[in-house]
Amino acid sequence: FFEDAADDSPLKHHSATVRDISGFGVLSRKESTQDVKTVLENALIAQKIIRCCLSELHAKDELQGVLAQGSALNLKQNISSLKTLEGCRRDENFSMLLDLDNGLQTKSNVGTTNVDADVSGGFSTITSCLEDLGLDHIKHNYLAGVENQLGKDQRTISNMRFLREKWFEDSLNKTLLWDDSLFPRMNERDVPTLTYEAPKHPAEVATDAPLLFSSQPMVNFYESVHKALLRFSRNDAAGGLGHVLEARKSVLVDMEYLAGSEAQTTGMVTYISKLNVLGQLEVVARTLEGTSPLTFLLTRWGFSDGAGAETSESLLLHNNVNSDMKEQVTSIDGALFRSIRTAFSVKEIALKVLANKISSGGQERIADALTSHIYESCRVYRELGHPDAAKVSLSSLRSLMQIFQQSGTTDDSSGILPLVLRLEDAKIMKSQNDLDGAIVYCKTIVNHLADAKNDLVDTERDQICAQSLLLGGQWMAQHNVDAAESILSSYFEKAAKLALQIYQKSSSNSNVHRASMASFKLGEFSANLFNSADARVSSEAWKRRVIVAKDRKNELKAVTEQIRKLQKKSRSSNEDAIRDAGIIHVQLSREVQMDDRELTSVEKSIQRYLRLAVESYCNALKLCPTAMTTVAKHVFQLVSLWFKNCQRTETKDIVNELLKANLPQIPSYRFVPLTYQLFSRIDEVQEENNNGFQSTLRDMVLKICCDHPYHGIVQLLALSNGKRVGDGVNGRHANAYLENVGTTKVDAANKIFQQLHKHAPSYVSALIDSYQTLMNSYMNLAEYDTSIVIQKRTTKGLSFKQYKLDLDSCLSGGRGRGKKRETATNMPAIITKPPSIRPDAQYGNGTEDPIGTERVVGFDATFDLTPTGLHRPKIVKCIGSKGSRFKQLVKGEDDLRQDAIMEQVFETVNDLLRHEGSTGNEIVKQSLGNNSTVTSRRLKLITYGITPLSPASGVLEWVDNTMCFGDFLTDKGKHIGAHSKYFPGEWGANDVREFYRTAGDAQNATRESKRKAFEKICENYSPAFRFFFLEYFKSSMEAWHTARTLYTRSCAVNSIVGHILGIGDRHTSNILVHTKTGEVVQIDFGIVFEQGKTLTTPELVPFRLTRDVVDGMGPSGTDGVFSKAAEDTMGVLRNNADTLLTILSAVVSDPLYKWSLSPLKANQHQRKNGEDDSRTGLPSAWMSSTSDENRNDAADRAIAKIHEKLQGYEDGTSGEHKTVAGQVKLLINEARDPNNLSVMFAGWAPWM
């Protein structure tokens, strides 16, 4: 409604009779006499109401979208007036601060009684902006000035409480002022450093509290915590506990206001942080009283009893230092960061207080704990995107270390600690985009260590040197600061070698982590150099250069021969000719030598980079601990290098021999996620040596099947079923399919099974038999012809026994045979829900349920048919060993490998989305406690299990509690759709479809006429998906708003990921909506990688963002929640472009992956939704698969297209590079453009 009111909507609804001006399903009738001015006034009133509601719900993203729309409405209403428009900028703290400052300058004096309400409350917003900008000192003085200028009517309880709390919060964060508490008698006087009892500021005067808070004095959290710490510093533990109790009461009072609201979940983190701080102070009090030992406090706070044993080791590694500095900043809410910072500050002050109160035996341990704690706070602030706060902590640490050294508490004669802090300086510089300074610091540290060797502290120095080399090389490589060869040899190779030497001396967890990371980075950089050099020699320019070099050699031979012939003749008569030929010979010789050197150099470089990359990856995978994250991308890179070079004459020996030698030491679970790609390359061995590709691949497959049978056996059996294609696969006749795919892979898979039966553990052999029996029964069901059943109009409760199918009895020995299978104890796992991958390969030896799933004990005796579908899939219910029932969809005459692989890619994208913010989230969890709830957007794709059984059949996990997007909106049988229910006077879905089709099929139809027809439909068919949330989530406002928010974010993630991967065919039956969460589930991925643009009616939109999709997003529409989530998703994908492209390269190079979309398949996709087409027969040649060369070209084109999108280039922009926000906005506009929607395929239902 807001878009329409501001004339900013891509779709106008001029004659719509009903408007929803609130976005919450509150309908109001628009009278025909209502003018534009009245509509704008109503819209602004609704916008203010919604803004208040969203503020109460803490829905910041959606609030931002509504504010942006309100700015547009204000502008339209006042565009011809002199009135100042305020609040137009709400995107950044600095912009908001400027808006507030400009507004306050035009108001009356703050001290007068007629001050606008916005002025009296404006200082809180300004304070928050200053805090988020890190201007704490300016904020402190600003608050002092505000308190002095407030009028009497503005000295309310809430205002004064706010000022006092901010004042004492600042006092806690100024931890440097508490350093003197370490040595209160240093100047022979016992004067507390901080006493806010001197009348310097009204907020410091304790006697003013009763006057400020009326008849009942109110206690404040930060003020009470501050007083408690002062009491502790005076050895008054009991008095301090009294203030802790007051602080707890203040927190509980504030929490009462959250009861029963959504803010109870979204706003609870701050209160949990405060309660956690109070719990820590209680332990401090007990330690001061002597009732609790110091060891208990240090252990509870995460400091080991021997914290001082390895100070530099603790600072560098035990505090979770992450060497991968690529886009590590994690953005969190400003209030949440302030809670984290205050929690760190209180712990720091408490440790400083304890340092003077504990006996001399514990002071060293407290000093070590305090050093480690401040260093950790510095790292946390930096990684949460607040480098200024990190610099303050680092300054505090330096000041603290000087105090410790002066008192003799610590000894740093080795000079290690300053280098550690200098390295942290470099990290802070990098986070502030001072790349040159960060690199200079790393170089200086390395040079200093090289000039000052000391055998007594070699290990610690080497640790810092390795860290500096690794970070310096990483930053230089990211920004191309130096020559690649120099970075490789001077940084990455040295760092990896040094880290490996440190690990060999001491195999501690920290050393393992460092050695693994250094090898991974060396492998990654070498792989990038190899790919760059390989792309160069594969380019047309290089090929032309090789041809030119060959021609030069031929010319040189010709000139040499010419000179030889001239010399045989009379020298006097040919002297000039010989001289000229000699000059040419010299020039050609030099050119040939230069060409040879260049060609030889590039060839050797390619082999060196490849060897170094594979060796480094193998070394890292052998070392890296199980808990190490982001390893998957390196595994994909290694496998991609292997596949790319395993058959090349120049490089096959390098990769195959290295993999053969290192494979036994690499844990097999690292390769389990790539079983699709690995197993599809199994083939017959053709006169290959023991180090050949197939031999190495078979060793890997055997190891996976032995160690992880529940993940490997199913894939291998599916490959062995390659000849079982039924009547055909995806529009290709059975004979044509088998002719193109071949049967050698089937024979190779069967030979591997023979080896498994001989050499694998006995339970693995039994599992093979069980899985084979189960999969055969599944395939029999998938291939069963249901045409007779459909004729009987019976699709529910069909008996397996009646139709001579044995899925329900296959694992029990067969129906009527009266005996149990010998392998009944080794039952297969639920085929659509494989167990979690176990690094230790412990799955229960086939007699216990693997962790993460159940084993199959049987099936319901009946099955159902789906109401629609080309081949009527069957619905079965599998019974697990724990009594769970798993609904499954069994499909035949369809190759599900493409769907399975897309789900694999989705899982990878989920990992990227999860890991992008995991660093910050882990920091928040560690800071606030493991039980805290972290507020985040929680972006993800909903995935489900897909298991191909053969080229023509497979089993899919049934996603419970979902319904098709279109089923909710349209009538279906006895079900009345939302549109008919809520807009009974408008056109029906069939009327709309027929009108749209008729207009599109008209002989003289043009794009303009199609658009007018589409607009006519929009005028008579209103969107109604907002009512989905009112019907399914009506229990509370919180449930409704949470579901709608999840829906909007889910739409954003699916839209962006779908666009990057080129997923098409997103009609209303291929999008499911979860009725318990509101999230979107995508199904049926037959059209991917831009194939939708090649359909008979091309798809012109990047994703589905029709009126009904947007209608479910609430008043902000695509602004706010959707756009923010879309930008976050696009940002994650673009930041991890290399990882995503590496994974996709391994996926699309799969030899069984079907790249070509046959015309028959394309025709079926646009016929199955009701589009009539007379084309029934196609030449058999069209049904055959493409050649390997064409498939590889298609794969290269798909990867290149994805790469362009991840770089910010889109079709139709004339090569213009887009920022993340610009790219998202462009895609949203294209998806909602009526010019595109009006020419879409009718079955896609663009009006809905």
Image: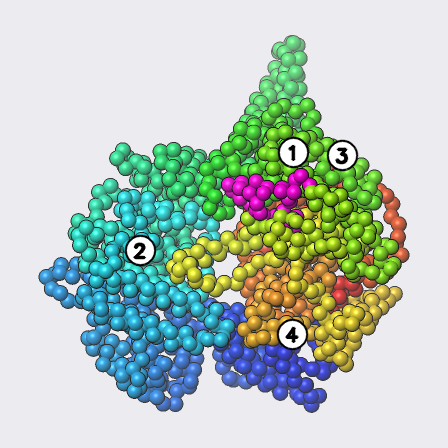
Front position in the image: 1153 or 1043 = 1043
Residue underneath mark 3: 743
Where does the magenta region start and end?
821-850
Residue 234 vs residue 571: left or right? left
Q: Is residue 505 visible?
A: yes
How far apart are the two marked residues, 4 and 1, measured between alpha carbons?
65 Å
Kind of residue at disc 3: Thr
- Disc 4 or disc 1, which is closer to the eye? 4
Front position in the image: 626 or 782 = 782
Q: Which label's residue is closer to the chain start, 3 or 1?
A: 1
Q: Which label's residue is closer to the chain start, 4 or 1?
A: 1
Q: Is residue 7 visible?
A: no
- Is the image coloured rainbow, by chain, by secondary structure, or in one colour? rainbow
How far apart are the two marked residues, 4 and 2, measured between alpha carbons?
52 Å
Residue 343 vs residue 898: left or right? left
For the point 40% across and 60% down, which residue is it? 929
Residue underneath mark 2: 374
